[in-house]
Amino acid sequence: MNTLQTINDVSVLMCDAEGEVIAGEREALDCIGDAGYQGARWAVIPVERFDEAFFRLSTRVAGAIIQKFVQYRVGIVVLGDISRHTQASPALRDFVRECNRGTQTWFVSDTEELRERLAGPAA
């Protein structure tokens, strides 16, 4: 079950690790709708919820999902260890680094890192 939390005065929808696999735009829209309905500025989605194709940039799945979040002005946080994916793909590693420089999409390893990010000016 997804839960609304406030971290450093920012409302975030913490998605369960258990649940529908986010494989494309339809599942992303479900998450965006839930976040919007609950008034969350960010959707925090555990890495386990993403289809493997999300981490292969050549599939364009990540771009399509992230674009939906951008369109609806809901931030997306991929929560968890993605090192096996970034070690296998320099392009993904670069993509993650660029996303983490921005204010819309973040890849964080744990909730403590999320708290630090949300305490900063980009939150």
Image (spheres, rainbow, N blue to C red):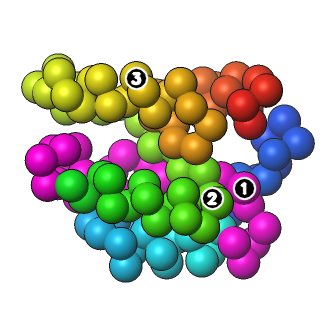
Q: Is residue 7 above or below residue 51?
A: above
Q: Which residues are magenta?
A: 36-59
* CA separation in Å, label 1 and label 3: 21 Å
Q: Is residue 110 visible?
A: no
Residue placed under numbered mark 3 in the picture: 97
The kind of residue tagged 1 is: Arg
Residue at disc 3, secondary structure? helix
| Residue occupying image coordinates x 73% and y 61% | 40
Within-10-Å neighbours for mark 2: few <14, some 14–19, many 20+: many
| Residue occupying image coordinates x 78% and y 67% | 39
Residue placed under numbered mark 1 in the picture: 41
**Pick the front one: 17 or 74:** 74
* CA separation in Å, label 3 and label 2: 20 Å
In contact (CB < 8 Å): disc 2 and disc 1: yes
Q: Position of residue 59 (x, y in %)?
A: 14, 55
Q: Is residue 103 left or right of residue 65?
A: right
User: Residue 56's image quarter?
Assistant: top left
**Pick the front one: 26 or 81:** 26
